[in-house]
Image (tube, rainbow, N blue to C red):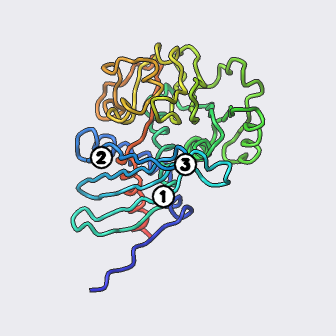
Amino acid sequence: MTRPTTQIFDADATARLTPYAALVDALKRASIDYAQRRIASPERLVVPLNEGGVLLSMPATAPDLAIHKLVSVCPRNGPRGLPTIHGQVMAFDADTGETLFILDGPTVTGRRTAAMSMLGVATFAAARPREFLLIGTGTQALNHLQAIGELYPEARVWVKGSAPARAEAFCAAHRGKVSELQPLAQPDAPLPESIDTVIALTTSRQPVYDEAARAGRLVIGVGAFTPEMVEIGARTIAGSALFVDDEAGAKHEAGDFIQAGVDWASVRGIASVLDTSARAPAQTPVVFKSVGCAAWDLAACRVAREAWSRG
């Protein structure tokens, strides 16, 4: 019997199949499924490549779907004019094992990561956010800007880069995605009091945000994904309630928390407040650390499958 050709979606098609609002809903469901062991998502396999690059193998299975993400991450690709991440996400029928479709790996990674941050905002923010600060000007900053533009289009977004010129260039290139986008005029000065959501999106090994924890300002760490990397400083962490997307992965990858020497018994997974009424008190400062796992890629494939089936 002739099998249909597996549908392969490029970056643009993958983005169209994974709108942010649907991703946030799917990640909420997947977070609960993963915590309750309805999704199997083993620790990612990391294999070294040349010049500090890595090859990541990330499978996940659920009763309704199975996926495998295979991507390379090569930090030195910037000077080559190449993206840092390459690869694909394959979706399989959970009963027959047949390949259903293939998505663009970097697009899935970027969009589900930004959507997880938006789930953090929906879960932990004291009120609907009015002003965001994005620290970083790379691909993840753009993904997060797009997510904010889709879900919070009325918000003002400030940008802080590793140099003022980077933030200015980022804002000039992407104005129009939100109501107001501008670089911090004085990046080393205290932040405007009006900023209620800070999202760090760098691979820094020094804190890029280390202000005293404050109620009403949610801090989200995204970029640091190894024990050596740190974006959120110990001063912020010490005064905050601590949450992560993946409790198992965070203990090995959340450099911010590892370097701050947190008591892991005090760190909770986001699923613990999604599936119960035991939320952090509204006036408690929160740091939400996202490290990612294949269960979130499975959530993205659920969204893509639904969108594809509707045509």
Disc sitting over residue 74 in the figure: 3
Position in image of residue 208 (x %, y %): 61, 25
Residue 3 visible: yes
Residue neighbourhood size for the residue with mark 2, other residues' Cα within 10 Å, grouped as few (<14), some (14–19), many (≥20): some
Circles 3, 2 touching at the beta carbon (< 8 Å): no
Of mark 1 and mark 3, the one earlier in the sequence is 3
Amino acid carrying mark 2 in the image: Ser
In whole angstroms, how far apart are the C-alphas of marks 1 and 3?
A: 11 Å
Where residue 42 sits, quadrant-wise, is top left
State the residue position of label 2: 41
Amino acid carrying mark 3 in the image: Cys
Amino acid carrying mark 1 in the image: Gly
Q: Residue at x 46, y 34 (%)?
A: 226
In whole angstroms, how far apart are the C-alphas of marks 2 and 1?
A: 19 Å
Q: Residue at x 38, y 52 (%)?
A: 57
Position in image of residue 229 (x %, y %): 51, 30
Task: Identify the element where label 3 is drawn.
Answer: loop
Of mark 2 and mark 1, the one earlier in the sequence is 2
Whether residue 201 is situated above or below residue 243 in the rendered picture: below
Position in image of residue 30 (x %, y %): 33, 45
Disc sitting over residue 87 in the figure: 1
Q: Indicate which label's residue lies in the foreground, 1 or 3.
A: 3
The C terminus appears in which quarter of the rendering?
A: bottom left
Residue furthest bottom in the image: 1
Q: Residue at x 36, y 36 (%)?
A: 249
